[in-house]
Image (tube, rainbow, N blue to C red):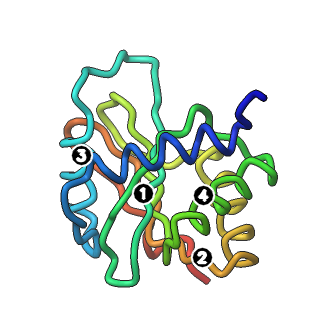
Amino acid sequence: MQPTKNQIALAELKFSYEALNRPLDVSKAETSFNLLKQLRSRPLSKDKVEWYIMFVNENHQVFSWYELTKQKQNPSYVKQIGGLAIACNAYGILILNYCDIIRVDANELDERFLKSCFNTCEELKIEIIDYMICSPQSYLSLRESYKD
């Protein structure tokens, strides 16, 4: 029997949980940015973008992460992210968009993806801690920008 996509994702999630030695407080955007820099061990090509979901406990400490293969607005895709959060008993998620650009700014794709995440996470009772766009030099935290 072939493993399902969710089983594969949970196996990757388990590995990332074991790889993080201790929870890291991400209540400040700068800490999230520094964590991402530590997780990235290879340079990013100019045209590539990576997305990470950090799973956070009630103390706003990251205890696990998952690298997204694509950023989709598809509701079922976002529900899979929520399902992973529920599976690892996360209080909330932190979404990190990593790209190698000079000027970090949110675009329409970021806004649509974030709106889709907020709608889905609200249904699942999972808090979105932050949505950050990062480059090697700087970051943009949208923590307050999209809250109602």
**Amino acid type assigned to the residue bearing label 1 in the image:** Met
Sequence-first disc among 1 and 2 = 1
Question: What residue is disc 3 on?
Answer: 138
Q: Quadrant of the N terminus?
A: top right
Reply above or below: 59 against 2: below
Local SS, label 1? strand
The answer to whether the residue labelled 1 contacts the one labelled 2, judged by CB atoms less than 8 Å apart, is no
Which amino acid lies under the numbered mark 2 shown in the image of this protein? Ile
Residue in front for this viewpoint, 3 or 132: 3
Q: Please give the residue where the numbered disc 1 appears in the rendered image.
A: 54
Q: Nearer the viewer, residue 107 or 28?
A: 28
Identity, as a three-letter code, of the amino acid under mark 4: Leu
Residue 63, position as x, y percentages in the image: 33, 63
Q: Which residue is mark 2?
A: 126
Residue at 18% over, 52% down = 34
Q: CA distance from mark 4 to mark 3?
A: 28 Å
How far apart marks 4 and 1 lie (CA) works out to 11 Å
What is the secondary structure assignment of the residue under circle 3? loop
Is label 3 in contact with label 2 (beta carbons under 8 Å)?
no
Mark 3 to mark 2 CA distance (whole Å): 27 Å
